[in-house]
Image (cartoon, rainbow, N blue to C red):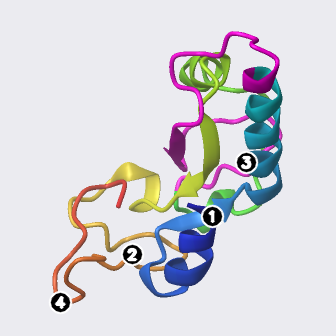
Amino acid sequence: FLDRIDHLDTEIKSFLTVFKEDALNKAKELDRKKSSNVPVGSLAAVPVGVKDMIHIKGKRTTCGSLLLENYIAPFSATAIEHIKQEDAILLGKVNLDEFGMGTLGEHSAFCQTVNPWNKNHFPGGSSS
């Protein structure tokens, strides 16, 4: 998934932040657990992109707004804690309309996300 993000996302612009090192470290951790027969969570190795208005401690959370361009989350949302407990791999933060206020996915302060299936269509939704 990280290779596809590297290869395609310069054009699609779906990710605002990619957690490449964290994702690779989590994958290695899961490999160690599995090879040692240590139980893993129900979401083990499932790749997850998180809407960039959900806090992940120590990570940038912009809500698609220049107002929060350099805001670092002081805590993680409960949903993130649960996702982590179940061993999903967090790939990064995905683009959205500013503060989630939009319907077409074209109003992020940073870039407009492109529909990967048809570049002439909107990706749709506030968390495009």
Can you see residue 57?
yes
Label 1 environment density (alpha carbons within 10 Å; few <14, some 14–19, many ≥20)? some
Residue at the image point whose x is 52% and y is 43% from the top: 48
Give the SS element for disc 3.
Answer: helix
User: Along the line of sight, which residue is nearer the eye, 19 or 113?
Assistant: 19
Label 2 environment density (alpha carbons within 10 Å; few <14, some 14–19, many ≥20)? many
Give the mark, 4 or 1, whose residue is nearer the N terminus: 1
Q: Is residue 36 magenta?
A: yes
The residue that disc 1 covers is 2
The residue that disc 3 covers is 23
The residue that disc 2 covers is 113
The CA span between labels 4 and 1 is 25 Å
Contact flag, marks 2 and 1 (Cβ < 8 Å): no
Which region shows up in magenta?
A: 34-63
Label 4 environment density (alpha carbons within 10 Å; few <14, some 14–19, many ≥20)? few
Q: Quadrant of residue 15?
A: bottom right
Can you see residue 73?
no
Picture quarter with the N terminus: bottom right
